[in-house]
Image (cartoon, rainbow, N blue to C red):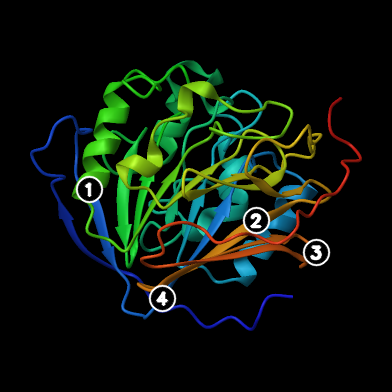
Amino acid sequence: MPPALRTPLGALLVAATACGSTPPSPAGPELRVANPGPRVRMAVIGDYGKAGPAEAAVAELVASWSPDLVITLGDNNYDYGGASTIDDNIGQYYRAFIHPYVGKHGPGASENRFFPSLGNHDWRTPSALPYLEYFTLPGNERYYEVVWGPLHLLALDSDPHEPDGNTADSEQARWLEARLAASESPWQIVYMHHPPYSSGDHGSTPAMQWPFAQWGADLVLSGHDHHYERIERDGIVYVTNGLGGNPDRYDLRTPIAGSEVRWNADHGAMVVEATAESLELRFVTASGREIDRRVLEADTPAPAPAPAPVEALDDDGPA
């Protein structure tokens, strides 16, 4: 079971400063947030936005951690990304982290602590308009950056509908390369929906196999495949985390190179504890079972060997 969790210190919005003159960059400000405590706790949920018991259980788990912020790995609003479903699929469970919250389920947060990324289901309504109208996010709101304590978070739009492209030579990729090069944070975390590498039903996404390590990323998070997997390659850690609430959990296929831990027997979420010296990653099931724990240390050139893989057979995913 996870250790006792502290009461989080309030995050303070201290500045909204321009991203700088290095093109290309989405229009609008970068959001910089300073947390007065010595560490930041972040929850990570993927493929979560389908109202029902599974999402409710994961949301309860996330709330129990009292995270400073929540990021999402796409598919925030099943099945079609529509305006009629978005509040029940998101605000019903996570309004306490969203500002401004404009839904019907009660009060929201006093400042925004919810930073989603777009998924393919969010794009099923033209231009992903309900998503873009529901959230107030930095930059162009499709891909953007947030600096929170020791974390530099860079959200990407991995969907082929992205107007600025989703390949390594796209405008979006040039933006990411420039922002990683300019980062002065201890930890650079890139997150998106489609996994660059995955041993699941959808499998790896070649278009998103950008040179993340070469550009300076420490960790790459994604969803889309409804399982949990930690992959270590190119000197950094990749995680697929798609068990946030969609009732369908997917089969595990032949492990790809670098796959260390694979799990699909229950829903769950990640909790990330960050200081300037270390980044602790844990995946915990909705019932409270810790499946994986990985600690990255600052100035470590490459991840250390991981323990033997953890696996579980799926019992209700698609064939």
- Which residue, given by chain and number where applicable, does mark 3 sit on? 287
Q: Is residue 12 left or right of residue 260?
A: left
For this rendering, which residue is in front, 274 or 52? 274
- Which residue, given by chain and number where applicable, does mark 4 sit on? 39
Q: Is residue 105 left or right of residue 309?
A: left
Where is residue 288 drawn, in percent x and y? 76, 68
Q: Amino acid at mark 4?
A: Arg
Q: What residue sits 62% from the left and 53% below the top?
A: 93
Q: Say if residue 305 shows up in the picture.
A: yes
Q: Amino acid at mark 3?
A: Ser
Where is residue 59 drawn, in percent x and y? 66, 57
Q: Is residue 59 left or right of residue 287?
A: left
- Which residue, given by chain and number where applicable, does mark 2 sit on? 269
Secondary-structure class at tag 2 = strand
Q: Are marks 2 and 4 in contact (CB under 8 Å)?
A: no
Secondary-structure class at tag 4 = loop
Sooner in the amino-acid sequence: mark 3 or mark 4: 4
Specify the label residue 30 is tagged with.
1
Q: Say if residue 106 shows up in the picture.
A: no
Q: Is 269 situated above or below 63?
A: above
Q: Residue furthest left?
A: 21
